[in-house]
Image (cartoon, rainbow, N blue to C red):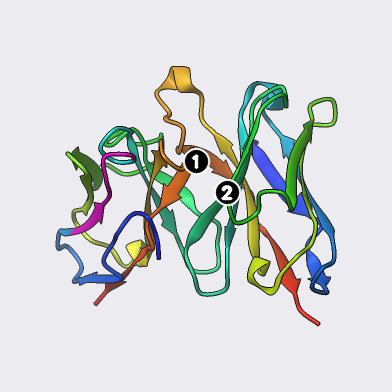
């Protein structure tokens, strides 16, 4: 079964750090671009970051640039999000998502597999 | 404030056809394909429509999408109670160099 499973969320104080992980299974992880998307409580979806298949290229939303780092370990089939200098407004459920293959007609904002999400709460 | 604009709510009775609109600009919907996601209460989003009008396997043909200029729409025919969910449109934005989402539309089946 194709699956993504996030972990690493929790309660952290403002200014603190947290590392999220996303374990992939059931597909060839190393061939897919991967993204992080977050959703604040009661709010909509917001894109956070993306990484290409071999980890050599990354992009970030302006709101997290310089504070968050997306990375991957293809040998471990795992995606990461290192979050530093956390703020109250970073409080959200964080989802990892797989972008479908371009060759299959999936555009750059077509995320065909999502994890169940992990909650991050930034509060003192 | 989301880059793509959706109505906050929509409703219909079982069996009806409802449409949800998504308005953008030349840097997103006007030049890139549109995708739609369904988020059932308490669950992760699920891809419903990709590349403007394509359905992933397993998505009923009651769901259809279209794009015209800088706007897109999602249509749901033969509305069912299990369609009650939040629906989000999304597209790549060339100016922001990232995907952008609509604010979401809460669909209520009366």
Vertical order, A52 against A24 (above or below): above
Vertical order, A119 against B19 (above or below): below
The quadrant of the image that shows the N terminus of chain B is bottom left
Q: Residue at x 57, y 73 (%)?
A: A41
Asked if marks 2 and 1 fall on the same chain, the answer is no
| A10 to the left or right of A62 | right
Q: Which residues are magenta?
A: B19-27
Where residue A87 appears, as percent x and y from the top left, is 71, 69
The residue wearing badge 1 is B98
Q: Residue at x 49, y 70 (%)?
A: A43
Label 1: chain letter: B
Vertical order, A52 against A111 (above or below): above
The residue wearing badge 2 is A61
A83 or A31: nearer the viewer: A83
Vertical order, A109 against B89 (above or below): above
Q: Residue at x 80, y 57 (%)?
A: A84
| Local secondary structure at mark 2 | loop
- Labelled pair 2, 1 in contact (Cβ < 8 Å): yes
What label sits on residue B34 in the rendered view?
none
Packing grade of label 2 (10 A; few <14, some 14-19, many >=20) is: some
Number of numbered discs on residues = 2
Label 2: chain letter: A
Where residue B4 appears, as percent x and y from the top left, is 33, 54
Where residue A57 appears, as percent x and y from the top left, is 66, 27
């Amino acid at each position: 079964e194709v699956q993504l499973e996030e972990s690493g969320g929790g309660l952290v104080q403002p200014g603190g750090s947290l590392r999220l992980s996303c374990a992939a299974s059931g597909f060839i992880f190393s061939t897919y671009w991967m993204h992080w998307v977050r959703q604040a409580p009661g709010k909509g979806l917001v894109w956070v970051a993306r990484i290409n298949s071999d980890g050599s290229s990354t992009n970030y939303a302006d709101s997290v640039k310089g504070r968050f780092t997306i990375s991957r370990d293809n040998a471990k089939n795992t995606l990461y999000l290192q979050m530093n200098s956390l703020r109250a407004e970073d409080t959200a459920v964080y989802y990892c998502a797989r972008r479908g293959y371009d060759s299959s007609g999936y555009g750059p904002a077509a995320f065909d597999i999502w994890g169940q999400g992990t909650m991050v709460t930034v509060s003192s | 404030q989301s880059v793509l604009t959706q109505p906050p709510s929509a409703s219909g009775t079982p069996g009806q056809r409802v449409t949800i609109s998504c308005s953008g600009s030349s840097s997103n919907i006007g030049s890139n394909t549109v995708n739609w996601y369904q988020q059932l209460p308490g669950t992760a989003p699920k891809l419903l429509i990709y590349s403007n009008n394509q359905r992933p396997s397993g998505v009923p043909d009651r769901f259809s999408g279209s794009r015209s200029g800088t706007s897109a729409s999602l249509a749901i025919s033969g509305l069912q109670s299990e369609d009650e969910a939040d629906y989000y449109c999304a597209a790549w934005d060339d100016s922001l160099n990232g995907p952008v989402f609509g604010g979401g539309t809460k669909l209520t089946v009366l």
